[in-house]
Image (tube, rainbow, N blue to C red):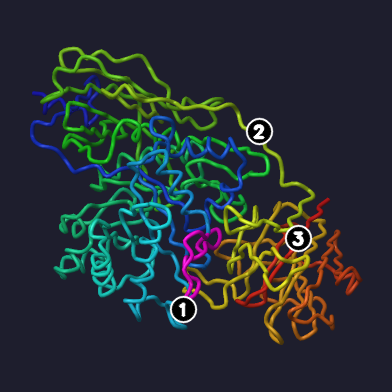
Amino acid sequence: MAALLLILAVLGVPGIQAQYNLSDEGGLGREFDGIGAVSGGGATSRLLVNYPEPYRSQILDYLFKPNFGASLHIFKVEIGGDAQTTDGTEPSHMHYPDDQNYFRGYEWWLMKEAKKRNPNITLIGLPWAYPGWIGNGKNWPYDNPDVTAYYVVSWIIGAKQYHDLDIDYIGIWNERAFDTKYIKLLRYTLDKYGLEGVGIIASDNLWEPISYWMLHDSELLRVVDVIGAHYPGTLTVKSAIDTGKKLWASEDYSTYNDEVGGGCWARILNQNYVNGNMTSTISWNLIASYYEQLPFGLEGLMTAKEPWTGNYIVSPPIWVTAHTTQFTQPGWYYLQTVGHLGKGGSYVALTDRRGNLTLIIETMAHNNSICIRPPLPPFNVSPQNATFYLEGSFHNLKTLQVWYSKLEVNATKPVLFKQLSPLKVSNGAFTLELGINEVYTVTTLLTGQKGTYPQPPKSQPFPLKYKDDFNVRNPPFSEAPYFADQSGVFEYFTNTSDPGDHVFTFRQVLTQRPITWVTDADQSISVIGDFMWSNVTVTCDIYIETPETGGVFVAARVDQGGSPTRLAKGIFFWVFADGTYKVTGDLCGQIVLRKGLSGVRARRWHTLTLKVDGFYASGLLNGNLLWKDVITIGPMHGWAAIGTSSFEFAQFDNFMIEAQ
């Protein structure tokens, strides 16, 4: 009779209350591996490191602290490869074959902060790009797989040796081709260095063709521990299931972090398992801590894009995450009794096999849960009553804790992760009255908490006047505050050959084009400031290191960053080691607005000043007017920037912006 009632409920017969069993009597489902997020792919946490305390620690608590905010189980980072990987470049630990430095960038620091808060957090590393020497001149990392494997394993060893970080999983090449020979050699190399406990995830792209090859190659099947798919739309494929391996949405979400983004996240956290047997879902990205006008702005679990003020926003996806992460742990098991609700929505239930039970329900409407990809087929959700029967080892439970969210678009104040009164279980059952766009967690656990801090400072634009002399003897990070590298890598540098005013400088350090993830620019560029700036003066001391062919620039009104950086327009003031200069309307140097002789030479310090006011620009060299009255075609606002004409060593010092 119960089965008949359930069938009628699913069919939507009026007057019938839907009934759902929660039981472990017939065995359990798959083991739960956790919910996580990605920093990188790329430079998505760039501005976070420059936040002042206490705000930086508060943000980290919202992300990683157990029973406080998102309480993430998994943290995945980009293994920096010196190339543009969506919102910027992240530096490699090996720019060159004879170079190893395990303190570049900020992912090491961020992993340590995550581990400090949650010692049990799972750590994953994944390359998006590789330094150019890996490919020996080709945009391909697999011709010498032993070299590539050594490079990746060195990163894992460095994480442990220099930061006491144990990496749990390693990936192949984000959303790009895999090579079965390389994957097997990677496993061999890991084992050779005593890293048998590091698992391999493949291929961080689609379910196929990796699943096919695993089913037809027994050694490949043995060495791959997890099949990771990106943006699977809650669905898997038969071949992936047939491998018997763990199935993860190893990158998902990537959606604006408002209520609709929260709805997207709530829906896929449940339905990735209900529809697709995926036991982990990992958000791209962890935190929107990059300039908002870069690609995919505001698509992290929360937002922290103003280190100059300390302002940050705890967005709805943080609390949606908490509905699962605060009441489960990796190593729990899904019940077999999970599924869709009769009038739309879904439910999953998990247990620690020691008597604890957590049920998560979502009733997200279609238009309130659209993710950026893939397209979402139409479906309907309507209010409904749902009765859950506790069976098996859960039958004698008497009281359950309840946490609730309502993600209503245009609501004056959405309800986010609110603790309701405990729920009494009567005769092994309880009933919930479910509305639309709601998330419920019903659990035996008493440990949930909605963490809170005082309101952070109010939002303010980037300061109109800003300067940096780079005089930092022992910088905590390799990159100067607020500079966001979009091509090339810029690092603090100690110029031991100059005992004068330029001992501590900012240096572009790449000399070879990386193995790229997108079509990178042929020039290096790092942007800074307010994208809405129009009338600005940019001044910087520059030092060209490459005789004859070297060149550098300062720029204003730069209108592109991220993956399309090579298309950037603006006003670019270039000087070259051959004694010439030019003014261009684009980064690639094709729109020439003015050119002439400057007398600049390599290995000497010079000061460039670019003034842009309305429709006109002028340039000064060493304080003297070099050119003027250039008509500014192209964008009327954008970032300030510095850079080089190719992948070459060059230094910058005493950078200053004055904006109106």
Along the viewing direction, whichever of 435 and 544 lies nearer the viewer: 544
Find the magenta span and give its range. 85-104
Q: Residue 634: image x %, image y %? A: 75, 65
Badge 2 density bin: few <14, some 14–19, many ≥20, Cα 10 Å: few
Q: CA distance from mark 3 to mark 1?
A: 31 Å
Residue 401 falls left or right of residue 352: right
The residue that mark 2 highlights is 457
Residue identifier under label 1: 133
Q: Which one is in front, 243 or 171?
A: 171
User: Which tag is nearer the camera, tag 3 or tag 2?
Assistant: 3
**Local secondary structure at mark 1:** helix
* Residue type highlighted by circle 1: Trp
Image location of residue 181, percent across then percent down: 25, 75
Q: Position of residue 560 (x, y in %)?
A: 64, 62
Q: Looking at the image, which residue is at 65% across and 53% down?
A: 482
Q: Amino acid at mark 2?
A: Pro
Asked if disc 3 and disc 1 are in contact, CB closer than 8 Å, the reply is no
Q: Is residue 98 magenta?
A: yes
Q: Along the line of sight, which residue is nearer the eye, 163 or 46? A: 163
Q: Is residue 249 inside the magenta stretch?
A: no
Instruction: Name the disc covering residue 655, or none.
Output: 3
Q: Is residue 276 above or below residue 409?
A: below
Crowd band around label 3 with a 10 angstrom C-alpha radius: few (<14), some (14–19), many (20+): many
In the rendered image, the residue lying farthest to the front is: 499
Q: Is residue 341 left or right of residue 81?
A: left
Up/down of 225 relative to 361, above or below: below
Earlier-in-chain disc, 3 versus 2: 2
Q: Earlier in the sequence, mark 2 or mark 1?
A: 1
For label 3, the SS is: strand
Q: Position of residue 526 (x, y in %)?
A: 64, 63
448 shown above or below 486:
above
